[in-house]
Amino acid sequence: MASHLKCIATTAYKFNQPSSFSLLYKPSLFLSLHNPKSLSSFSLSSSSSSSSSSSSSSSSARSFATSTMGDVLADSTMDAVQRRLMFEDECILVDESDNVIGHDSKYNCHLMETINAGKALHRAFSVFLFNSKYELLLQQRSATKVTFPLVWTNTCCSHPLYRESELMKEDVLGVRNAAQRKLLDELGIPAEDVPVDQFTPLGRMLYKAPSDGKWGEHELDYLLFIVRDVTVKPNPDEVADAKYVSREDLKEIFRKADAGEEGVTLSPWFRLVVDNFLYKWWDHVEKGTLNEAVDMETIHKLIE
């Protein structure tokens, strides 16, 4: 895939499906699921994590949930936590210009049937958290995730929900609030470790990617960078493993993935960010000049 492509609002890029690689697992001092093919872990301090409250479901989502609940309950691949999130979390539906046009359940927004019908585009965010050594924190999604289970990806990837605190448009405050919430939910990172005013929104991208025959993603994704030393305690319902990586570590991971040498996969949105933006933005992280890279006017269209 091409690297560092120049983007404008109307530009579309080709998206290639990720290839695979395998990484060695070692026991860690933080909470992690046993997975013999995961990345080697690192020692982290622990902190308490908590679950956030969910917004009320829309009437359309409620009717959909009623008609499909039997199918979901019968799905042995979906555990109780993921089932609850699928029906209680309300994603923010947007058009391709990022205007809010409604809301729907997380379940509905991630069905390929809904995506293919053009009714599932929703807001998302991807956090890239660096420590004071300018190493990037990666996570491996848990085996129970409905979409893209056990893939390696950037620090945290999720959705602002249809609630007042996460719909706030000024200074991208709603998305920042959602990022702070999910860093706690997924990685146990306390809110005080990641103040909302420390996130730098660098840009937005629009992409679509299938996970399997039933599930997929169609997102308008906010790309948030933050440089902080944090306390991490992964939530096993969300995260199987985690690791800080240097630039060279990440390049080696992608080399193995592209060569198909081993067996662990990368998320498609992470590949898109790495191939188009990450390394030039990493330069700004190291120089302390992230504000020079900000472009929140453009919506980069990265398509299949």
Image: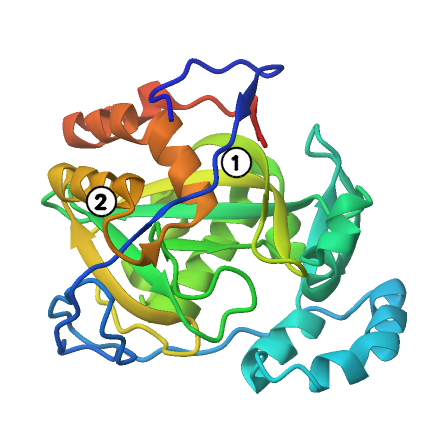
Binning the other alpha carbons within 10 Å of mark 2 as few (below 14), some (14 to 19) or many (20 upward) gives some
Q: Which mark is residue 171?
A: 1
Percent position of residue 210, x then y: 60, 49
Tell me how far mark 1 sits from mark 2, CA to CA: 38 Å
Identity of the residue drawn at 21% across and 77% down: 46
- Is residue 162 at all visible to an observer of this figure? no
Asked if residue 110 lies left or right of residue 240, the reply is: right
Give the quadrant of the N terminus.
top left
Image quarter for residue 270? Answer: top left
Q: Which mark is residue 256?
A: 2
Give the quadrant of the C terminus.
top right
- Is residue 231 at all visible to an observer of this figure? yes
Q: Which mark is residue 33?
A: none
Binning the other alpha carbons within 10 Å of mark 1 as few (below 14), some (14 to 19) or many (20 upward) gives few
Give the answer, above or below, for where 143 lies relative to 160: below
Secondary element type, mark 2: helix
Percent position of residue 302, x then y: 55, 28
* Mark closest to the chain's N terminus, 1 or 2: 1
Residue placed most toward the observer, 273 or 288: 273
Identity of the residue drawn at 51% across and 25% down: 296
Identity of the residue drawn at 46% across and 44% down: 268
Percent position of residue 276, x then y: 39, 26
